[in-house]
Image (spheres, coloured by chain):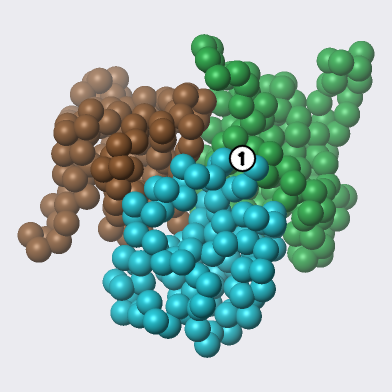
Chain colours: A brown, B green, C cyan
């Protein structure tokens, strides 16, 4: 089956990102297709490569990036939510005159239409948040 | 917009009050963008979500943008099914009169102005939710 | 058209479980995960409410979240099924749609 996942909270503060990650892994293990993971609200913070969690803790962003690389999953960060919270890719940084970008591997910044499209194209949409 | 699977029923479920958290505002942003996709869209307001529609919101004193006027233009985006749960209103001592008036023009009825807000019982809302293909919760 | 409802908040500090249980159709399924797993335990103030919901709908609890919190499966209310993340995925695919009570 084709599944889409929405993540509405950032990593570490709430369990939502961990739950979404475990759910996504389990769905892939069962042979389902994950059409897209869409990050909204503070969920966009899953996509910053600047996080440095302690060595004995999990690195949620790296886990997402690895998952994207291994299974070719589309990790989409909402542009409007990302701009508010200071998550930028190279283009966004240039466009807004910022001196750097912080998006992690495997994530891309795009519009909210990507969420609606995920809902239309997938058989199920599962929302994780607080 | 291409849609191979036909039109889906999308419901935006709003259960949180405005301003205290950003969920209400960012939910509205999804609704506005989603309107371009020509799906069957409805909004449900229940629990503290009913406070999002309260009339007379004035945010000057808190330094935040008052986004309540946006609900009034949803009709221009062909979004005219705003279900407000009766029990949630009653539990908060509110009636329909405490909410903003939100109208749309019905293209199937000679563009007559009609209210977008429909107060429904918990049982009616339960049936409406059950019909949905996609439930976006905020 | 059976729906899967997910609840992730403790019923002792948040009304999401109440909101959910009051608005689900007969035959629906409810999955308790994250802090909502406390709502699946025996002997709590919400146990009666959960049990009466179970007369008309199925209730599941996520095992990994239970174990993480030191809650034993033996203490889960009779009739609640304990599932793992794979079971969570199955619940999603077996139901027509999913509603998260955030």
* Horizontal arrangement in the rendering, residue C7 relative to residue A2 (left or right): right
The chain containing the residue under callout 1 comes to B
Residue C66 lies, with reference to residue C5, above or below; the image says: below
Can you tell which quarter of the image residue A2 is in?
top left
Instruction: Write down the residue under mark 1.
Output: B12
* Horizontal arrangement in the rendering, residue C89 relative to residue C58 (left or right): left
Q: Position of residue A17 (x, y in %)?
A: 33, 51
* Nearer-the-camera pick, C84 or A40: C84
* Nearer-the-camera pick, A98 or A44: A44
* Nearer-the-camera pick, B64 or B84: B84
Residue drawn 35% across and 80% down? C72
* Nearer-the-camera pick, B25 or A100: B25
**Quadrant occupied by the C terminus of chain A:** bottom left
Residue drawn 38% across and 77% down? C73
Residue drawn 50% across and 83% down? C42
Judge whether residue B114 can be spotted in this image: yes
Q: Position of residue A89 (x, y in %)?
A: 24, 28
- In the rendered image, the residue lying farthest to the bottom is C43
């Amino acid at each position: 089956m084709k599944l889409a996942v929405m993540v509405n909270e950032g990593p570490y503060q709430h369990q939502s990102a961990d739950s979404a990650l475990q759910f996504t892994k389990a769905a892939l293990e069962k042979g389902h297709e994950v059409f897209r993971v869409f990050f909204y609200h503070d969920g966009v913070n899953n996509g910053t490569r600047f996080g440095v969690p302690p060595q004995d803790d999990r690195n949620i962003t790296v886990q997402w990036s690895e998952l994207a690389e291994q299974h070719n999953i589309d990790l989409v960060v909402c542009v409007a939510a990302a701009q508010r919270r200071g998550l930028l890719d190279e283009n966004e940084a240039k466009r807004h005159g910022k001196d750097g970008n912080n998006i992690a591997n495997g994530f891309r910044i795009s519009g909210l239409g990507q969420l609606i499209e995920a809902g239309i194209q997938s058989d199920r949409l599962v929302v994780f948040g607080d | 917009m291409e849609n191979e699977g036909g039109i889906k029923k999308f419901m935006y479920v709003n259960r949180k009050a405005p301003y205290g958290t950003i969920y209400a505002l960012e939910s509205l942003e999804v609704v506005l963008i989603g309107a371009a996709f020509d799906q069957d869209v409805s909004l449900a307001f229940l629990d503290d979500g009913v406070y999002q529609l309260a009339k007379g919101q004035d945010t000057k004193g808190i330094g935040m943008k008052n986004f309540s006027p946006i609900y009034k233009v949803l009709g221009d985006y062909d979004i005219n099914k705003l279900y407000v749960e009766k029990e949630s209103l009653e539990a908060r001592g509110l009636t329909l009169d405490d909410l903003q008036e939100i109208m749309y023009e019905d293209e199937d009825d000679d563009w007559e102005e009609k209210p977008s807000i429909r107060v429904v019982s918990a049982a009616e809302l339960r049936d409406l939710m059950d019909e949905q293909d996609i439930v976006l919760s905020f | 058209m059976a729906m899967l409802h997910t609840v992730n908040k403790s019923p002792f500090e948040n009304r999401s479980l109440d909101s959910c249980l009051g608005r689900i159709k007969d035959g629906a399924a409810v999955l308790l995960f994250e802090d909502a797993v406390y709502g699946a335990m025996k002997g709590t103030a919400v146990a009666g409410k959960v049990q009466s919901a179970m007369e008309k709908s199925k209730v599941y609890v996520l095992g990994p979240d239970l174990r993480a919190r030191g809650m034993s499966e033996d203490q889960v209310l009779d009739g609640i099924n304990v599932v793992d993340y794979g079971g969570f995925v199955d619940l999603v695919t077996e139901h027509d749609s999913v509603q998260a009570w955030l």
